[in-house]
């Protein structure tokens, strides 16, 4: 049996997209060309691979078998090509990532120039969607997630962690006073998260949790942040999202000795058969370096704010772990450390000057 690799690749896309026309549009070729390639592949295999009905396409048993082996074959070929080309010219090619819109805008985008400066042959295809992507079906190389369970289908590298703290603006505190005890919050304007009610249970240290209703509610994390910055009231915000505003003096953390801030891990998740690709390792290593650099004691910009320990990265967090694909999607407020990543990325790519 002699198979053409391109025909196998096309077949996997037909299976994933569901129609011949969709595969043809993706390749910008006539449907007849896709049909001929499928016919050629079925002839080489000696079996029918797809059922064609008025309702669409479905895999035969033999087609399902070929799809499984074909994916592995293509992944192995891509890994070999990447390894060989990487040894000659460094990591190269397209990396497709899946992140929440806020993560894409505030973390990936600010760090991208530094990544390209280090690895100019890399290219990123960013899938910014709150929906949990099917990594195999959607061709995702890396997904940024929080929380995970063990599985044999995915591999994850924990690249950091985050927590949440109560914040208010100096303008609000000047107008309404600074609460000194959780009981004082009964006399303050609180802002609740209507999209994630569980975030309205504020964990106290050694005391029962405080369940807030809020005098204002918002279903969007960016709006919550804006309301607090503009002096509307007090809310519990993602520390990494608040960090740039704290550095600018626009936000102040409050009641830190009274409310807990459990650390939540952040993972870069990859398909098990692809996580060793140099282009994927290059992206993950770069983002990990940015975050590790941010947490170093000698980092002056990090030390300039009480949020210097909001993002911690240690070698212990860089281990590889198997994860399940059905864990919940990353929350919209995940890891919004734009200013910190910009600064860390610049430091990583700044030329070294010899005195």
Image (cartoon, rainbow, N blue to C red):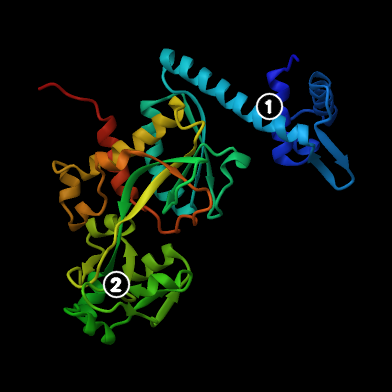
Q: CA distance from mark 1 to mark 2?
A: 51 Å
Position of residue 333 relative to residue 56, above or below, is: below
Q: Residue furthest bottom?
A: 187
Q: Residue furthest left?
A: 355
Position of residue 304 relative to residue 171, above or below, is: above
Give the position of the N terminus as an image quadrant. Answer: top right
The residue pinned by badge 1 equals 9
Position of residue 73 relative to residue 323, above or below, is: above
Return the mark for residue 203. 2
At which x and y percent is residue 52?
A: 87, 39
Numbered disc total? 2
At which x and y percent is residue 198?
A: 42, 71
What residue lies at 24% left-to-right and 42% top-to-bottom? 314
Of 222 and 270, the residue lying toward us: 270
Q: Secondary structure at mark 1?
A: helix
At which x and y percent is residue 238?
A: 34, 61
């Amino acid at each position: 049996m002699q198979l053409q690799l391109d025909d196998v690749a096309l077949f996997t896309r037909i299976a994933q997209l569901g129609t011949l026309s969709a595969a043809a549009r993706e390749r910008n070729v006539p449907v007849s060309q896709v049909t001929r390639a499928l016919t050629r592949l079925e002839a080489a295999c000696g079996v029918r691979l797809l059922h064609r009905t008025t309702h669409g396409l479905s895999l035969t048993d033999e087609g399902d078998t070929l799809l499984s082996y074909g994916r592995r074959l293509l992944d192995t070929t891509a890994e070999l090509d990447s390894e060989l080309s990487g040894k000659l010219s460094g990591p190269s090619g397209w990396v497709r990532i899946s992140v929440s819109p806020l993560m894409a805008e505030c973390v990936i985008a600010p760090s991208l120039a530094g990544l390209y400066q280090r690895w100019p042959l890399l290219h990123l295809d960013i899938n910014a969607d709150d929906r949990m992507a099917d990594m195999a079906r959607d061709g995702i190389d890396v997904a940024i997630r929080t929380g995970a369970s063990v599985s044999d289908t995915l591999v994850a590298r924990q690249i950091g962690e985050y927590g949440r703290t109560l914040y208010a603006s100096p303008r609000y505190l000047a107008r309404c006073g600074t609460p000194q005890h959780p009981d004082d919050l009964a006399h303050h304007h609180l802002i609740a998260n209507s999209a994630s009610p569980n975030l309205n249970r504020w964990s106290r240290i050694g005391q029962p949790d405080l369940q807030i209703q809020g005098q204002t509610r918002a279903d969007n994390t960016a709006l919550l942040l804006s309301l607090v910055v503009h002096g509307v009231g007090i809310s519990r915000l993602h520390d990494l999202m608040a960090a740039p505003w704290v550095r600018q003096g626009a936000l102040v953390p409050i009641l830190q000795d009274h409310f807990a801030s459990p650390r939540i891990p952040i993972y870069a998740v990859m398909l098990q058969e692809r996580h060793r690709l140099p282009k994927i390792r290059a992206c993950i290593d770069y983002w990990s370096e940015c975050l590790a650099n941010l947490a170093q004691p000698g980092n002056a910009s990090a030390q300039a704010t009480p949020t210097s320990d909001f993002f911690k990265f240690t070698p212990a967090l860089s281990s590889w772990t198997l994860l399940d694909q059905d864990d919940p999607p990353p929350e919209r407020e995940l890891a919004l450390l734009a200013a910190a990543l910009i600064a860390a990325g610049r430091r990583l790519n700044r030329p070294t000057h010899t005195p």
